[in-house]
Each structure stands twice: as C-alpha cells, then as structure tokens.
Image (cartoon, grey):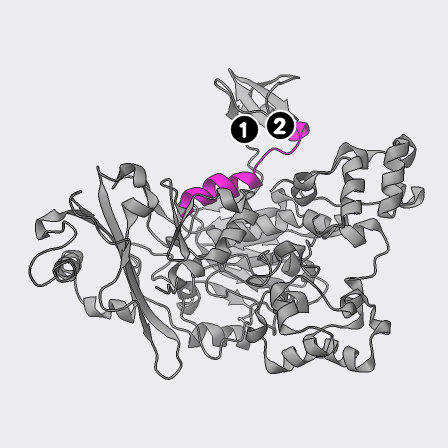
Amino acid sequence: MKLSLVWCMSLFSAAHPAGAGSDNGDIAEIVQMRWPGRPGSGGPDMPMRRKPRLTPADQDDKTVVIVGAGYAGWGAAHRLVEGGMRAEDITILEADVGFGGRAQKNDDFMPFPLDLGPSWIPPHFKSELAALSGVPEEDLPINNVNGVGLWRDAMTYNEFLSNHIISKLDVCDSELECREQTEKMGLNFEEKTKWGKGCYSKNDKVYWGDKKTGALTGKMKRINCDKVNKEYGCRVTSVDYEGPDQVVTTCESGSSFVSTQVIVTVPLSVLKDGDIKFKPVLSDGIQQNVEERGWFRGFKLFLEFDTDFDPESMFNFGGEYDYDPETKLLTGEHSFWDYTGNSAPDFKGTRNLVSGYWIGTKADEFDGMNKTQIVDKVLEKFKKYYYDGNSYTRGYHPSSYKQHLLVDWENPEVKPFVRGTYSQRSVNFGGHRADNRNKLFLAGEAFPAPLSEFCSSPIYCYFDKWWVDLSEEIQEAFTILGWDQKMWNKGVNTPDTEEMLWDELTNKQKKAATVIGFTQESWDKRIACASPEECYGDKWWSGLPEEIQNAYMVLGYDEDSWNYGPAPDTFGKSWDELTNEQQQAATLIGYTPELWDDKNLVTTTAA
C-alpha cells in the first residue's frame, strides 16, 4: 500500500523559511530544515551539508518574531538557536491558548493520549525529528506500518514537541543561568551536586551538575530557564515590515512586538482569508501562491469498538486518494487504521480504538451532515466492509460500536485558527517565500519547501533532491561539474570540482556553476577559509576528518558538544594557558598563537 501522507507531511513543512541571498540572508540560511540530505544520501556527512552559525555581530543585532507555535514555529526557533542566535532574542506568538498548531492531542477520550491532527510519520521525517530532538533515530517511539511510521508507546506529535523539542530550547545551559533562574524562583542555590548535567531542584534547593552521566534520583526535578519568549492567546492581525530596520508585529489585543525579522508560519487559510494585514502588501509571487492554491476541508474520526473486533492494521472505504485528471494533483485522501494496536498496544485487549480521516474531495460525500449523521454514515461503511456476504468478519458486529470522537478541522467554531487541514499544491507554485528585503519569511505548511527562486544558496536549492527531480538544465550543469546520477543519489563520492576554487574551474565549468546559482564568492566560500572556524565551524561532527576530530577531542570537544554546544572551557583560555598537547592539537587544526588568541568562536547552545 502506498501512502500519500500529505496530512502529516504538511505538518513538518515547518522551519523552512528561505530567502534570497542578501545582507540578512544569514537568518534565511540558518532556519533551513536540516534534512538528512537527499533521500538515500549520506546525510549530514555530505560535504555540501553545512551547519550555519551566526557571528557575534549577527547575534547582537538580530531579533526574530515567529508567528505560530506549531512544529513550523518551534522548528524555526530551534534552527535559529542551533545557528547561534540567543533564544532570548526570539519571540513566538500564537493565537491559540497553547502550542502545537495542528498537532493537538486529547487526553480524556481514552486512557492514552490521541493525536487529533496528523498521525503518520514519513520515513524522512524520522531524521528530522531526531535532529530537532537529539533523540537517536533508532530510539524514536515510532512503529513501521507499511513503510511509514505511527507513534507508539502512546506518544503523540504534541507530546513529542513539548518533551523533546520545546524543552530543549529552554534548558539551562550554564551554572550562571541556573543561578539566575534560582533567584527568580526564590530558592537557594547549592554549590555541588553528584547528579547529571543540568539544573535541578530538591527540597527547595537548586543544584547545577556538570557531569554528562547520571540520572535524576529521589525528588530531583529539572528546572528550565524558559528562554524563548512566548505569547499565547496573541492573534496576530498585522505585520508592518515597511521600515528600513525593523518589523512591527501586532496582535488583536493591541500588543506590538518589534524585531529585525519575522517568520510567519500560519496555515494557508489564515493568509487566504486576510486575517493578517501586511504592510507593504505581500509580493506578487507570494500573493499568487496564496490565491491559486486550494485549502482542503476535512475531519478526523475516532471510533471505539468492543475488544472482540479485530480491525485491519490499515484500510479504507472506496480508495485512498482522489486526483485531478488534468493536473494530476492530489485533491483528496482517506484512510483508517487500528489506533490501539499500532500506537497503544499495551491497551490491546482492554480498549479497541480505530482512527481515520476524510480530506478534500474525499470529504464531499458528508456535505451538509451534522456529526451524528457523519458517524452513522461511517458506521454503515464498517458494516459493508467487514461483511463477506454471509457473515461479519474479524469479530465485527454492528453492536461492536461503543463511542466516537469527531474532530471537525474545517469548522471555524471548533478550529478558528486553522479552519481546514492542509493546502493543495499548485502547478504554478513558485516557491516565493520571502520579501525582497529579507525581513519577512513565509514558512510552515503553506510555504513548505524552498525552490530555486528563493533559497539562500544553491546548496539548499538542489542538494536535497534526487537526480531525477532536477530539471534537465540543472542536471546538465551538474554533469559539467563532474556529477552523475549514481554519485549524486548515493552521496558517497564527489567530483574533483568540489575541492576546486573558482579560478581553478574551466570557463565551461564556471558557466555551469553560474547556471546552478553560484557566484565566485559563494563558490569559494565553501572551500577557502581564513581560520579554523571558517574551515570547520559550520560542519557537523560526522563531516570532520578523523584527524581533526581527534584534535578537537584533545581540546575538550566530543560529538554532542560540537553539534549542539556549549564549547569546552579550553576555548576560553589563552594560547599560553594551553598544555603542550593542546597547543599541538590546535596547530594541527590550523591555529597559530595569534589566531587562537584573536579567535571569536561561535558555538550553539544545547537546543
């Protein structure tokens, strides 16, 4: 069974606000989703996949407002912090009373939580979830069902966002932060602790532990520093980005928030209905994308049956998808699955829940019906599906039905800040997602993936795609630069041109690089570096040569601190304070005593 999964994919379109290169392009580059490379590629090991970081000067004058507190908004915040921005310089505004966007849950209907919005997890999302959360991909609580994922262990998108992504942005990263939070809480700070790394409280006393091992014991409780500014119940009504140096974002209550840039992650319905007034008005390219694309209606339904009924793991009534015969675009989808068996197997035998959805044209057959009528019609479908002409199958009987929960996503009274499920793609979708000043970025499900018109570098335009997905013109250009389909898709080897400076390219290769979108400056920037920070600071640990990894380990780094920070204490010392072994390691990396003492290393906090 091939599963479309648009209902879940749109959730994660998330933190992809991309902008054309300019003086402020650093924000655009940083908030790119760190996909694990092209499907099937070597992931972050790919030499083109780099970890962008802000310089201290960038940090000092950058503040960002993010509109929307779903996966898109929090994913963007995570990317900004990961790129070097202070969490305290980020403000998230959310119209609803809490976080999550369409990733909402219900804790009352069953003895386990329910995903009220998207449920499925496509394979490539696992890598992104792992990257955002720091949870190894193999340890994610996800079941594989017909090639795609469903949460297991009663996990939901909402809880994963809260427990593994939002919480990481608010972690106290130093003893100083822990002390400051202790003072705010009116508690007493103790000097020592034998527990693991972090800020903890016990019996009205707070401890900072700097060990990397150890677990909470007894009544120990982790304390977060609540760094990212959050304003829930703040329905944004206007975004004024006309001024030369600032953006003013205003909520319905009259509260205004000033920033240097704004990332808008609201659903397409909010943009189509004009809930937010933009000054100046959005560019023609963005307006066209908003106006030409459809917004899908739909609902999600949970049905509880008695435990004698053994539903199929996945099934549907009348086909999974509808497509437009001319455009070949998806117009509707529908599916049902065994929720208890897949997501809460510990309750199998005591509770029996199935879940399903009807979206877009698949939902048209329920036009004009109230909730009771919708449920009655769906139950009639169950009767027909589990009847073989002679008897009911798999333990089903009409009397098996016990109760239901219907989530009407298109009803503005029920979901006033969403009013539907997800946006339809358009044959004319151009990827326009940023204003020409790079102060306003569109992200989230309404503006999912960066296309060639708007991306901060050719790296992000093309290197996440399969070879077959590249246009003929771009394929030809990359071929001239030494790439072929096998090399591109496997991501194991790279052509010699990847190690060459612009002046070392032939005229034909320079022309090909220009077609792809490189300039001499952007091409050389990937290769030439004036300092170890430029050479290695934007790479993931797995992308460093082994001898460089070993040298950085002598200086106090390991994979976790390199990828997520903070920098080891060694980098706060002068050259003369280093041991002979540390000086030798620093020299191998590329430092001279002058470069070391003058360095301005930027590290990310553990986000």
Q: Is residue 263 above or below residue 488?
A: above
Q: Is residue 503 above or below residue 101?
A: below
Q: Is residue 197 above or below residue 39?
A: above
Q: Secondary structure at mark 1?
A: loop
Task: Say which residue label 1 marks.
Answer: 223
Can residue 348 be found in the magenta stretch? no
**Label 2 neighbourhood size at 10 Å, few (<14), some (14-19), many (20+)?**
many
Depth check: give the residue in front, 552 or 598: 552
Q: Position of residue 577 (x, y in %)?
A: 89, 30
Q: Find the magenta span and give its range.
A: 157-178
Q: Which disc number belongs to residue 178?
A: 2
Q: Is 164 left, or right, of 561 in this rendering? A: left
Depth check: give the residue in front, 331 or 598: 331
- The extreme bottom residue here reads 326
Residue type at mark 2 is: Cys
Residue shown at 92% from the left, 45% from the top: 592
